[in-house]
Amino acid sequence: MALALNSFAENAVALQETAAQAGNGGPMIERGAAAALGIGLAAIGAGYAERAIGASVVGALAEDSISPGIGILLTVLPETLVIFALVALFVGP
């Protein structure tokens, strides 16, 4: 969800820049603000996902169903969304 919101913010900036070039006025949101919004929403989405995953991992560790390494890996996976958002910020046009 956060990655989709990040790409939505990037597409909104691209559409506004196209409108500005056509003479329809300036962008409604600046490029840096759109990037900050996308990264912030990605971080909120990752935190929301980690909340549920963390609770499940603690329960599975208490029952000895999984190893601690797998639990850490599952907890860290949502953070890749934020890393992708940061990469998109620095690699984008």
Image (spheres, grey):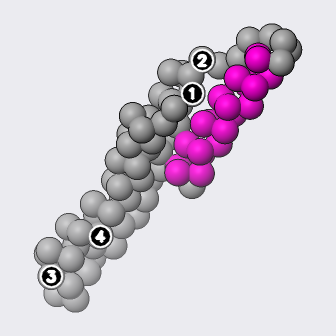
Q: Is there CB contact under 8 Å for labels 2 and 1?
A: yes
Judged by depth in the image, the label closer to the viewer, 3 or 1, is 1
Mark 4 is surrounded, within 10 Å at the Cα level, by few (under 14), some (14 to 19) or many (20 or more) other residues, namely some
If you read the primary sequence from the N terminus, does the residue marked by circle 3 or circle 1 appear first? 1
Q: CA distance from mark 4 to mark 2?
A: 35 Å
Judged by depth in the image, the label closer to the viewer, 4 or 1, is 1
Instruction: Indicate the amino acid at tag 2.
Output: Glu
Q: Is residue 58 among the parts visible in the rendering?
A: no
Mark 1 is surrounded, within 10 Å at the Cα level, by few (under 14), some (14 to 19) or many (20 or more) other residues, namely many
Q: CA distance from mark 3 to mark 4?
A: 11 Å
Q: Is residue 75 magenta?
A: no
Instruction: Indicate the amino acid at tag 4.
Output: Leu
Label 2's element? loop
Residue at 50%, 21% (x, y): give it. 32
Q: CA distance from mark 4 to mark 1?
A: 29 Å
Q: Is there CB contact under 8 Å for labels 3 and 1?
A: no
Q: Is there CB contact under 8 Å for labels 3 and 4?
A: no
Judged by depth in the image, the label closer to the viewer, 4 or 2, is 2
Left or right: 42, with 16 as reference point: left
If you read the primary sequence from the N terminus, does the residue marked by circle 4 or circle 1 appear first? 1
Residue 58 figure quarter: bottom left
Q: Is there CB contact under 8 Å for labels 4 and 2?
A: no
If you read the primary sequence from the N terminus, does the residue marked by circle 3 or circle 4 appear first? 3
Position in image of residue 2 (x %, y %)? 53, 49
Residue at label 3?
67
Residue at 33%, 63% (x, y): give it. 77
Query: In this picture, which residue range is highlighted in magenta?
Result: 2-21
Q: Which mark is residue 34?
A: 1
Q: Which mark is residue 74?
A: 4
Instruction: Indicate the amino acid at tag 3.
Output: Ser
Position in image of residue 18 (x %, y %)? 75, 26
Instruction: Indicate the amino acid at tag 1.
Output: Ala
